[in-house]
Image: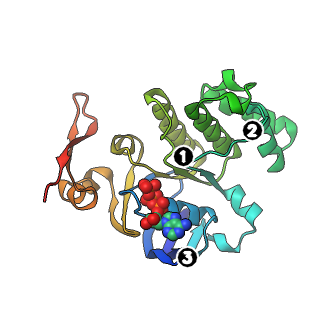
Amino acid sequence: MSLQINDLQVIRGYTRIIDGLDLAPLPAGSVTALIGPNGAGKSTLIHAIAGLLPARGQLSLHGQPLAALSPVARSRLVGLLPQTLPQAAGLTVYELLLGGLLTGGLSRAEAEARIEHYLASLQLTPLAMRPLATLSGGQRQMVALAQLLARQPALLLLDEPNSALDLHWQLALVEAIRNDARERGSIALLALHDLNLALRCCERLIVLDGGQCVADGPPLSVLSPALLAQVYGIHGRVEACSQGRPIFVLDQLVRA
Ligand SMILES: Nc1ncnc2c1ncn2[C@@H]1O[C@H](COP(=O)(O)OP(=O)(O)OP(=O)(O)O)[C@@H](O)[C@H]1O
C-alpha cells in the first residue's frame, strides 16, 4: 500500500517542469517532506498528484492509477491543502466543514461527529461559529487543515502548510499530520521550506531542484553540507541540540 510515482512528466505553459521523475514508493503511514529552492517544482508535483495539473507517467495510489479515477473518486482519496486558501464568503467554520462532508456522502450525524472530533483535537472548537471572513490567515490555515483531516483521504498533500502559522500552531500541525499517518495509515507529502520543521516531523526528505529529484532518504543523510551548498547556495549544518534532537543551523551564503 503506497503512492507510486514513475516517469512523471508535467508541462506548464510551454515548459517541461518535471521530466521523467521516478521516486521510491511512499508507504502507508509515512510522512515525507518535499524540499528544494523556489521554483524547484514542489507545487507543480503536488498539484499534478492532486489532479489539478495534467501529467503523464505513472501515478498510482495503493495500486490504483489515479488518472483512471473520476474527479470525485480522486478527490475522496487525495486531499490537498493549497498554498493559498480560497475565501468562502459568508460561511462559518462549522458550515464550511459540514458542507464539505455532506457533499462527500457522509450522513449528517457522521459528519457532525467528525467535525467535533477534529475541531477538538486541533483545539479549534472556539472558532466553530466564526464567519470565515473574520479569521486571521493562520486561523484559516488551521481550519483548512481541519477540513482536510475530517475528509480522511488516503493521501494528504500539503503545500507549505505552515506559511501563516506561529510556532505553537506549526507544532500542532505536524503532530496532527503524524497522528493521522500513525492512526489511519494515511500518506502525507508536505512541501516545506522550513528544514527544522521537516527534521521534526518527517522520516524522509525528497529534494527537488529544477524539477529533478537530487536527493531522497532519511533527513540526516540527505541534509549534508554539500547538498545544502549545491541546492540552496548556503553553508549550513545539522547538529544535535541540548536535548539530542537534530536542528538545522544556517551559517551563511556561499560566496563565489
Ligand atoms: N503557469 C505556469 N506556466 C509556466 N511555468 C510555470 C507556471 N507556474 C509555475 N511555473 C514554473 O514552474 C517552475 C516550478 O514552479 P513551482 O511553483 O512548482 O515551484 P516551487 O518549488 O513550488 O516554488 P516555491 O518554493 O517558490 O513555491 C518554476 O520555474 C515556475 O516559474
Residue placed under numbered mark 3 in the picture: 58
Q: CA distance from mark 3 to mark 1?
A: 23 Å
In this view, 197 is above or below 227: above
Q: Hey, which residue is sitting farthest left in the picture?
A: 256
Residue placed under numbered mark 2 in the picture: 97
Q: Is residue 230 left or right of residue 36?
A: left
Residue 225 position within the rendered picture, expressed as x and y whole percent measured from the top left: 18, 53
- Residues at discs 3 and 2 in contact (Cβ within 8 Å): no
Q: Earlier in the sequence, mark 3 or mark 1?
A: 3
In this view, 187 is above or below 6: above
Q: Is residue 242 left or right of residue 182?
A: left
Amino acid type indicated by mark 3? Gln
Residue placed under numbered mark 1 in the picture: 181
Instruction: Report whether residue 4 is seen.
Output: no
Q: Residue at point 55% right, 49% down?
A: 83
From the image, which quarter does the C terminus lie in?
A: bottom left
- Residues at discs 2 and 1 in contact (Cβ within 8 Å): no
Mark 3, Cα crowd under 10 Å, few <14 / some 14-19 / many 20+, is: some
Mark 2, Cα crowd under 10 Å, few <14 / some 14-19 / many 20+, is: many
Residue 222 position within the rendered picture, expressed as x and y whole percent measured from the top left: 28, 56
